[in-house]
Image (cartoon, rainbow, N blue to C red):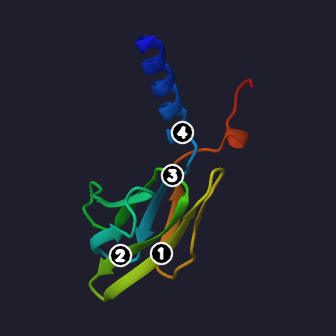
């Protein structure tokens, strides 16, 4: 019974992780630091590339909710509002940021269904 429960929990937790979209955010200037108002909903972390421009942020979503991601740059603090829903993630449009979704929705995946 314990093995069955362990397998059931791991399957449930694993499917929950794929229900949300993760994003790369590219800023127009270098990022000094980044923080999330609720890291249990969205974690935000700088992502350093090989050219080391320090302008890429990784947003990892965990569960539904609304958070504010604060980005500290040389010219001041900027904020992105993030609304995580079961089927999509909505980011506020802010000048100086470009968003790229990392997860491909099932509707766009190729192959047999």
At horizontal 50% and vertical 40% (from top left) the residue drawn is: 17
Dot 1, crowdedness within 10 Å: few (<14), some or many (≥20)?
Answer: some
At horizontal 51% and vertical 74% (from top left) the residue drawn is: 81
Q: Up-down: is 17 above or below 64?
A: above
User: Of the residues under marks 4 and 2, which one precedes in the sequence?
Assistant: 4
SS under mark 4: helix
User: Gap in Å between the C-alphas at discs 1 and 4?
Assistant: 24 Å
- Name the residue nearer the viewer: 12 or 35: 12
User: Gap in Å between the C-alphas at discs 3 and 2?
Assistant: 21 Å
Which residue is at the far front? 1
Closer mark to the observer between disc 3 and disc 2: 3
Question: What number is the disc on residue 71?
Answer: 2
Q: Are marks 3 and 1 in contact (CB under 8 Å)?
A: no
The quadrant the C terminus occupies is: top right
Q: Up-down: is 32 above or below 84?
A: below
User: Gap in Å between the C-alphas at discs 4 and 2?
Assistant: 27 Å
**Could you tell me how many numbered marks the image carries?**
4
Residue for badge 4 = 16
Q: Position of residue 73 (x, y in %)?
A: 30, 80
Residue for badge 3 = 63
Closer mark to the observer between disc 3 and disc 1: 3
SS under mark 3: loop
User: Gap in Å between the C-alphas at discs 4 and 3?
Assistant: 8 Å
Q: Are marks 4 and 3 in contact (CB under 8 Å)?
A: yes
At horizontal 66% and vertical 50% (from top left) the residue drawn is: 87
User: Of the residues under marks 1 and 4, which one precedes in the sequence?
Assistant: 4
Residue for badge 1 = 80
């Amino acid at each position: 019974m314990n093995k069955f429960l362990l397998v059931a929990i791991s399957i449930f937790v694993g499917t929950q992780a794929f229900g949300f979209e993760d994003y790369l955010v590219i800023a127009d200037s270098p990022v000094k630091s980044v923080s999330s108002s609720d890291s249990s909903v969205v974690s935000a972390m700088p992502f350093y590339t090989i050219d080391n421009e320090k302008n890429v942020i990784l947003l990892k979503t965990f569960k539904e909710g609304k958070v504010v991601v604060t980005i500290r740059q040389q010219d001041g603090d900027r904020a992105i509002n993030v609304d995580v829903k079961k089927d999509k993630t909505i980011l506020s449009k802010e000048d100086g940021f470009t968003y790229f979704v990392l997860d491909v929705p099932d509707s766009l995946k190729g192959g047999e269904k």
